[in-house]
Amino acid sequence: MEWGFFTPDAIGKEVSSQFGFIEDSVASLSSLSVEQAQELFYHVWLYTHGIACLICKGSLYLSEEEEKKLLITAFESFRKNYQ
């Protein structure tokens, strides 16, 4: 899959070092291929970043419980695309 501007190098070495670990972990703990795990991680990362931007801007206010519920729901929804 072509990610456009999104590459591990574009977001820094510290974060990019975590991509491989997370993708490999997701792939090994599920029936996902490494490529599918990369896609899943990408979608979750973008969703999470969007929430963070809205919170930082002051446009969204969530309790910790609401944040957890949103992220779990999003992850489960994204993951269903690979079943």
Image (spheres, helix red, strand yellow):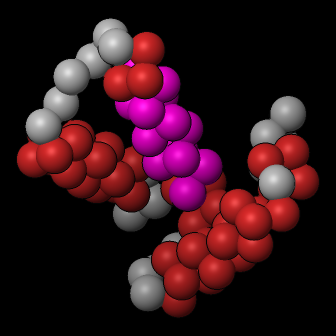
Q: Is residue 42 left or right of residue 59?
A: right
Figure quadrant of the C terminus? bottom left
Foreground: 29 or 62? 62
- Quarter of the image for residue 58 reads top left
Magenta stretch encompasses residue 82: no
- The residue most toward the bottom is 28
Q: Is residue 41 above or below residue 52?
A: below
Q: Is residue 29 above or below residue 33?
A: below
Whole-percent x, y for residue 2 in the image:
84, 43
Please tell me which residue is depicted at 39% across the width and 57% down the height of the picture.
79
**How many numbered marks, from 0 up?**
0
Q: Main secondary structure of the magenta part?
A: helix
Q: Is residue 79 above or below residue 51?
A: below
Whole-percent x, y for residue 27 in the image:
55, 80
Q: Is residue 83 left or right of residue 45?
A: left
Whole-percent x, y for residue 62 in the image:
18, 30
Please tell me which residue is depicted at 29% across the width and 47% down the height of the picture.
71
The magenta segment is: 41-54
Please tell me which residue is depicted at 70% across the width and 61% down the height of the picture.
15
- Quarter of the image for residue 57 reads top left
- The residue most toward the top is 59
Q: Is residue 34 visible?
A: no
Please tell me which residue is depicted at 58% across the width and 74% down the height of the picture.
22
Magenta stretch encompasses residue 43: yes
Q: Is residue 56 visible?
A: yes
Foreground: 83 or 6? 6
- The residue most toward the right is 9
Q: Is residue 82 above or below residue 55?
A: below
